[in-house]
Amino acid sequence: MTSSKSKKAQRRLSPWFWVPSLYFAEGIPYIVVMIISVIMYKRMGISNTDIALYTSWLYLPWVIKPLWSPVVDLFKTKRLWIIVMQLFIGAGLACVAFTIPVPNFFQFTLAFFWLLAFNSATHDIAADGFYMLGLTEHQQAWFVGVRSTFYRFAMLTGQGLLVILAGYIESHSGLESVEINVQAVNQTVNQRIVSPDSLEISPLDGDLRIITHPQKLEITIEKKSRHEIDQITEMVKQWNANFMTTREAEKKQDQSTAPSWWQRNVVVKIESGFRAIFGSDKKIADRLEKTGNVRVIYFYLSRQPEPDRTIVVNFGRESGDKSINLIEGARREFTAANWNQPLMSLIQLDPKLKQPTSADFVARAGNIPLSWMVTFGFMAILFLFFSLYHHLVLPYPKEDSARTDITFKSFFKDFANTFVLFFKKDKIGLSIAFLLLYRLGESQLVKIASPFLLDTQELGGLGLTTGQVGFVYGTVGIAMLTVGGLLGGFLAARHGLKKWLIWMAIAINVPDVVYIYLAQTQTANFFIINLCVGIEQLGYGFGFTAYMLYMILISEGKFKTAHFAITTAFMALGMMLPGMISGWIQELIGYYNFFVWVLISTIPGIILVNFLPIDPEFGKRQEK
């Protein structure tokens, strides 16, 4: 009996039973907080400004992680911290799922994302520490590739499979999509704009569905006076504003509130500076000023939905001639109170259009809240399983115990000393500047890339579905990121970091130009989109190698582990601060100009690498 128990315990100590699952579990919550939250909020109708600002704040737990890492060492075991944190992460994911359908979902889900971020950062501390305690030195070296592979697999699952799952549920739930072919014709057609009040809307039999009027749209190719078009546009905007949901109305009211001192004296001046340099988004501004002909499409529901149900209709151009544009009425939330008050969507022809042409528009009403509720519910169950599984399989290293040999006073004295020694390193100011500026462009791009792919073409985006975005970043993107990282590691090991540093800096920054191309062309070719994102991710993976190696370089010496943790804090800070303002900048100057700004932001990092003191032999594989 005793022998049986001993064998069972020995099996539990096998690293293959817990290293892969532990690092898969470490990667998922980070991707959820940093990437999936952005995509979910975009699909739920949150502005790019709010998405970038509030989700960038979620980096804070990783910024200050070194400050509370001693708590994990002082209290209880790292094994217990892992199990409890996974349980808390599962509970946090469940809370996100339950609060998605509530009226103030943004505030509630954001609060739980904050808790998830702190739990995830704490889990990182415990997992990395346990890895060193639960394995011999030889096993640590052997399994370093395994842990990295399964962390990448977590990225693939989070950015790819989970987003694709949400997209699949969204496209196979809710109401059936409605396709509308809009034709620009030479012959004169009846173009009288019908007052929405005059439409006789009564409940229809059958399933709840989207009703359009008219079902086929033709627009005569002719120019109209700007004054007339402006009047029609204002009328359509006013009508749509009258039937906003409570959340939409509150947002509009917040935007119309009198500006504060900070807004008047700081924000407005910065905005003026950006506009003076870049102007507004010319493509969108042009559309609002065009004098091409217009017509209206009306959307409403076939009958009243359930009292607690919200139907979100997103309307935009799917394919066809970009000379036919949607200039108002891209989104509406229908409820039991406004189901029979039509959304007026205004479509306009380019005034330079001379020949007949057409474009296909689609109104989608997938059940977006349900898709994300199921996705987060699945992840919650997964982490409850992880907590139970790791409770059963994690070994009990003798070294994994609460530190009773030192006092709080002596511990924090040594802890403070590690910070002092870090900031006394040679040219530490230059090193910190590198950590903050090397990814200045990427830190802004990462918050806007997914919204750009999801936004309609009329808003400057590419109009991809949720599932398509999951494929682009979760499969092609991750694959190319991995290839770039492996290539960077191989070349750095062969020739040293110094030789490849400038090329890695160029590789991580210059490929951002592909987003300028995508914003300019707004291509509907899915292969081209994947190719562009793949190139950018390949460059990022290659260039990020230099960043990681330099973090290792400046951590050399006494307190190496603690100093590396400090560099990771600066790494997170370098992502957090620029990311917070990226959405505001994008909405100020538009996608195309924003990506130009991102490319300009890469210049300081590229210049800085030329001044870093690096031993030419650092990073080279040592010959035995």
Image (spheres, rainbow, N blue to C red):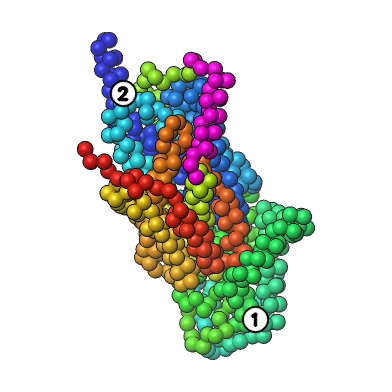
The quadrant of the picture occupied by the N terminus is top left
- Name which of mark 1 and mark 2 comes first in the sequence: 2
As measured in the structure, the alpha-carbon distance from the residue carrying label 1 to the one carrying label 2 is 76 Å
User: Does 171 lie within the magenta span?
Assistant: no
Q: Which amino acid type corresponds to the residue marked 1 in the rendered image?
A: Arg
Q: Mark 1 points at which residue?
A: 192
Q: What is the chief secondary structure element of the magenta stretch?
A: helix
Image check: 618 left or right of 572?
left
Residue 396 percent coordinates (x, y): 37, 20
Say the numbered circle drawn on residue 42: none
Q: Name the residue under label 2.
A: 12
Q: What element carries label 2?
A: helix
Give x and y (percent) for residue 257: 76, 57
Judge from the rendering whether residue 231 lies leftward or rightward of residue 15; answer left or right: right
Between residue 371 and residue 536, name the one nearer to us.
536
Q: Quadrant of the C terminus?
A: top left
235 is higher (above) or lower (below) than 79: below
Tell me if residue 613 comes above or below residue 7 in the rendering: below
- Residue at horizontal 41 percent and vertical 37 percent from the top: 556
List x then y, in percent, for residue 314.
55, 62
Going by the numbered disc 2, the residue's amino acid type is Arg
Drawn side of residue 326 relative to residue 265, left or right? left
Q: Please tell me which residue lies in front, 218 or 501.
A: 501
Magenta region: which residues? 404-427
Mark 2, other Cα within 10 Å: few <14 / some 14–19 / many ≥20: some
Question: In this view of the protein, can residue 546 be seen by the observer?
Answer: yes
Q: Nearer the viewer, mark 1 or mark 2?
A: 2
Where residue 61 sits: x, y (%)? 54, 38
